[in-house]
Amino acid sequence: MTVESTAPRKPRRSAGTTGTKSTAGKRATARKSPGTEPELVQLLTPEGERVQNAGTAAYDKYVADITPDELRGLYRDMVLTRRFDAEATSLQRQGELGLWASLLGQEAAQIGSGRALRDDDYVFPTYREHGVAWCRGVDPTNLLGMFRGVNNGGWDPNGNNFHLYTIVIGSQTLHATGYAMGVAKDGADSAVIAYFGDGASSQGDVAEAFTFSAVYNAPVVFFCQNNQWAISEPTERQTRVPLYQRAQGFGFPGVRVDGNDVLASLAVTRWALERARNGEGPTLVEAYTYRMGAHTTSDDPTKYRADEEREAWEAKDPILRLRRFLEASNHADEGFFAELEAESEALGRRVREAVRAMPDPDHFAIFEHAYADGHALVDEERAQFAAYQASFADAEGGN
Amino acid sequence: MTQTESVKNLALAKAINESLRTALEADPKVLVMGEDVGKLGGVFRVTDGLQKDFGESRIIDTPLAESGIVGTAIGLALRGYRPVVEIQFDGFVFPAYDQIVTQLAKMHARALGKVKMPVVVRIPYGGGIGAVEHHSESPEALFAHVAGLKVVSPSNSSDAYWMMQQAIQSDDPVIFFEPKRRYWDKGEVNTEAIPGPLHKAQVVREGTDLTLAAYGPMVKLCREVADAAAEEGRSLEVLDLRSVSPLDFDSIQASVEKTRRLVVVHEAPVFFGSGAEIAARITERCFYHLEAPVLRVGGYHAPYPPARLEEEYLPGLDRVLDAVDRALAY
């Protein structure tokens, strides 16, 4: 006979479990749900079953009135994002992009959090937030300019309140904090969300962002996608405690959510954003997920991780579990999935054609926008460059 | 000239204080932030009294974290603010160097001009005050080397006032190097007459035999050198460069075409210093006018020394005169 223990349980998969203190254990007791990480907020199991218990009660209300239409919308977002991502990977393989950072596996974390945002909220992404960009209405082809090498960003951050991709990881958490300080000064009730990963969590800038946001009570949500790997280094190399617990030391709450569960990601982010809007300050959300692909197209994960690990996570696929839920609850029929498949292929085609048609920038783009108010040296060097280029034209003309 | 409301005799630090006050009054988006800038008014009192008059929301005492100061200033600028941040001392800017170089300098270009970064980073710099380690350095070349940044340094109260006005109005990030040893030097400031563009050099003493080019704390020294040289019958022109990026090569060229000799003076190490860039470009521009190679006087390629040795390390009257003698001997 099995008696369910009520004693605090230790997280099964977190760095330095020997150092894990009672906080994790208490959360584990409060939010235990069979078959998941103990301290994880999960609303949909990998099998697509809706979880509702004492542990989820605090977050259930944020998705209580979600309609079948909205659920299908989340599904559509994830499928199209994955399709776009796959197309970009192919385009890199075909030589159309220099590099691609795939989000494969992280669709739920990104769509769930991205769809929790209001239009007037502001997003500070890393370079892998293609799903969030999708939610913000950024044209997917705009994301590809920097990976093709025609610009270093290029979209108008204020057009969709989606800032440029940040490659020096962690830097953007401070920009988000400063922006949020500005929001508070303006008396607005917008919120700001900063995306970063388990690797960036080691950056000093992230610690400084936690400090600044806490002492100024800034309306910012720190959304950490713990995808288990920072290129080749596992999360264990970044931290000795579960990442969400870091928030406690800075004086604001942290919560770990199942990042492969779009519903839970949506609910927890809504909760954190509500805190921001209510003047309750920052929140750390650790979305526990998995980078199914390589770090980028230049990476080779077979050098550092086992296939079995990937296979175990495939069973927790974010899209599959929502499909199971939609099917079991009769929220979507075959027609829906077939239509989405066609839309998905059309998106792939559109992205492919747009990238291939993307022109190389004019040579003089080197000098453009180096400064807003101009700079004498830039003017001088531009003129020298023009004369140099013109010298070839002269030579050709003289022949 | 009669002393009117708009003409004041101010110490350089007070001139910056007045300039900040003017900017804060004129534009509600201007913020001042840094360590100890609030109640204390900054360790040099440059922001003295501002928090009392403009409140904690605009004169912001920050946590002790330079990267955080500049990083949040970037975010505030993205929100439409015009932050003026203080780095307490030159040697403390390096935790923020990443944010300044990889983010602040490049944001405008990365967005293809769609965002602007009107952030002023104030840095008290240079030696001569007998300070401890990391409080006397001159890292301006490390910023001038970075495209996207503008780098300026006033030498007197009037420029301190007006260059700060212009730096705050600039839509580009400006690294504003304040010559801390001149903070207490007084000078006339006319708050109604703009002396000229931010990045234009000024001839502060006319001469015919040799040009001394300097900025910030070394301008005063160069004027003293010119006085001393005049007693020996030599006529030196002194050029206050004011801006290190962009450098006003046209003004240097015009002066050198007249005097045919150039000595550049800065506290920063000579090696890869701004003098090296000036020497290279002026040699290109004025090759047939020069009677002597461009000489440089500055710090040595050694860590900034303990205070008891700084007079030997820093350019002084005799070291600059020695370079003048060598240039004139060609």
Image: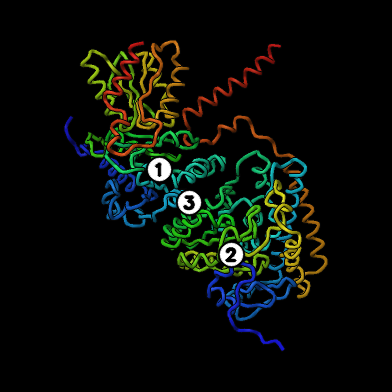
Q: CA distance from mark 1 to mark 2?
A: 35 Å
- Above or below: residue B72 compared with residue B114: below
**Which residue does the numbered mark 2 point to in the structure image?**
A286
Seen in the image, is A327 located left or right of residue A375? right
Q: CA distance from mark 2 to mark 3?
A: 23 Å
Residue at the location (53% across, 25% down)?
A381
| Residue A72 x/y as whole percent | 72, 66
Q: Which mark is residue B17?
A: none
| Residue B244 x/y as whole percent | 40, 31
Q: Which mark is residue B75?
A: 3
Q: Which mark is residue B120?
A: 1
Q: Quadrant of residue A304?
A: bottom right
Q: Quadrant of residue B198?
A: top left
Furthest residue toward bottom: A1
Task: Name the kind of residue labelled 1 in the image.
Answer: Val
Give a yes or no on whether discs 2 and 3 share a subunit: no
